Amino acid sequence: MGDIYYKTISQITNVLLFVDGIKDAAYNELVEIKLEDGRTVTGQVLDTRDGTAIVQSFGETRGMNTGNTAVRLTGTTAKLKVSTDMLGRIFNGMGKPRDGGPEIVQGEEIDINGSAINPYSREEPSEFIETGISTIDGMNTLVRGQKLPIFSASGLPHNRLAAQIARQAKILNKSEGFSVVFGGIGINSEEANFFKTEFEETGAIDRAVMFMNLSSDPSMERIILPRLALTTAEYLAYKEDMHVLVILTDMTNYCEALREISAARQEVPGRRGFPGYMYTDLSTIYERAGKIRGRKGSITQVPILTMPGDDITHPIPDLTGYITEGQIVLSRELYRKGIYPNVDVLLSLSRLMNQGIGKNSTREDHRGVVDQLYAAYAKGKDLRSLTEIVGEEALSQGDKAYLKFADLFESKFVNQDYYEDRSIEKTLELSWELLSNIDRNDVKRVKEEYIKKYGKWEEKNGPK
């Protein structure tokens, strides 16, 4: 079978070839496409029906024709050779070196499609991952083994946030191995150079593996790249006992490539033209995060997507939200105010936060302080809307304190420098400083013992 070339191509549409007379083609099987001028392109079997194999080309279909293009089945699925030699390296969307270095020669070849984690074997995500960013560590804590996406929009600084998380992320137990796998999906050259420079100049590249598919590269690589990144992460986590943080940006480009394939296959479109199986397809990526019982390593995912038209109900963020364990939402309003990182804490949520915070992880007062911050900030934002109608003069002194709190919360807590790496202790101390701007009697979500131990009212106002 491996030496047989089929010249029975009946149709070529965009990135798909329809090859007749093949009865034994396997789903996801790799193929070699030989062009008339001698060039070869790699492809993959997407589907087989009535003796016709639908082949997806990973390169350009330019120059291919139904008469002189031949297809050969290889009998294997897409595999990636992985080893610890990949740390510090940059690869393209097909797993080939992009940094000018040698190919990975020694290592273990693993099917990039992976396999689902048996639910019984899954260990509950726990343990805190510190990113050095207050709005995440304090309000939407990232937990080891979690999948926590960032919902952004066009023009917002999600790339800077991704680079900062990759540079600063750490686990509290310094003796355990920690690495970052970064996947850039359909990014432009400027973005690629930004990530490359950031990783190299800050030294983050030493503990990272980077995969980058540029907007000028074949769009089909965007389907492969997340699976290459996660296959690498699984090797580092489950074979090398590392804790791995996987950052994928931009998942919207991945979904657009998925829609492109679906249209080429002439499938019946679902919402907004995306295929009806997009939920299932996304789950094959997101569900590869987690912890396995008996294994020391773990995989934590932070996928980043840009919401088309700033619409959080768009199918991409909507379906992502169903699969993942919360979301971090970036605000255009805060961005216009010059606040970075522009995280809208009231729209954001980490569903597994309680499993990674507390006395033996971050600090005993963490949950109560965060609840109080949420309540005070929400009240302050409501009062902002009210002042637009009645004016600030109509507010009571207590309401004015909450109005001031909302401004201080955004300028002191949410806002921080791109190179500022705040420890969780500093974040919590800052929280107490902000809470001292409201009446101590209004602090009802924190235990009295913690107020006495950590509160800043006496420092600010003197003992009563």
Image (cartoon, helix red, strand yellow):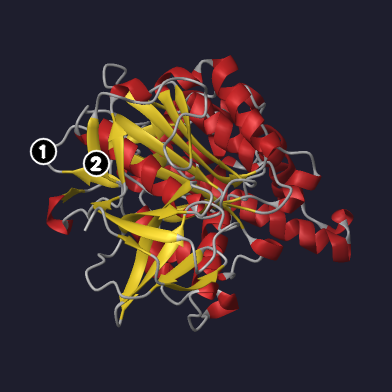
> Going by the image, does 35 lie left or right of 194?
left
Residue 79 is situated, as x and y percent measured from the top left of the image, at 29, 44
Q: Count of labels shown?
A: 2
Instruction: Please name whichever residue, 243 or 182, is drawn nearer the observer in this view of the structure.
Output: 182
Q: Residue shown at 56%/18% (left/top)?
A: 200
Q: Nearer the viewer, mark 2 or mark 1?
A: 2
> Going by the image, does 296 lie left or right of 178?
left
Q: Residue shown at 45%/77% (left/top)?
A: 276
The residue under label 2 is which amino acid type? Answer: Ile
Residue 218 is situated, as x and y percent measured from the top left of the image, at 56, 50
Question: Can residue 158 be seen here?
Answer: yes
Q: Residue shown at 60%/57% (left/top)?
A: 62
Q: Residues within 10 Å of mark 1 (few under 14, many from 20)?
A: few
Give the residue number, with chain letter if any, for mark 1.
Answer: 294
Residue 196 is situated, as x and y percent measured from the top left of the image, at 59, 26
Q: Is residue 90 above or below residue 76?
A: above
Q: Is residue 48 above or below residue 307?
A: below
Instruction: Please name whichever residue, 168 or 71, is drawn nearer the observer in this view of the structure.
Output: 71
Give the residue number, with chain letter if any, for mark 2.
Answer: 110
Q: Residues within 10 Å of mark 2 (few under 14, many from 20)?
A: some
Name which of mark 2 and mark 1 comes first in the sequence.
Answer: 2
Question: Can residue 172 be seen here?
Answer: no
Q: Which mark is residue 366?
A: none
Quadrant where the image shows the N terminus: bottom left
Q: Residue shown at 28%/26% (left/top)?
A: 83
Residue 416 is situated, as x and y percent measured from the top left of the image, at 66, 30
Q: Secondary structure at mark 2?
A: strand
The residue under label 1 is which amino acid type? Answer: Gly
Q: Secondary structure at mark 1?
A: loop
> Going by the image, does 292 lie left or right of 215?
left
Quadrant where the image shows the C terminus: top right
The alpha-carbon separation of the residues under discs 2 and 1 comes to 21 Å
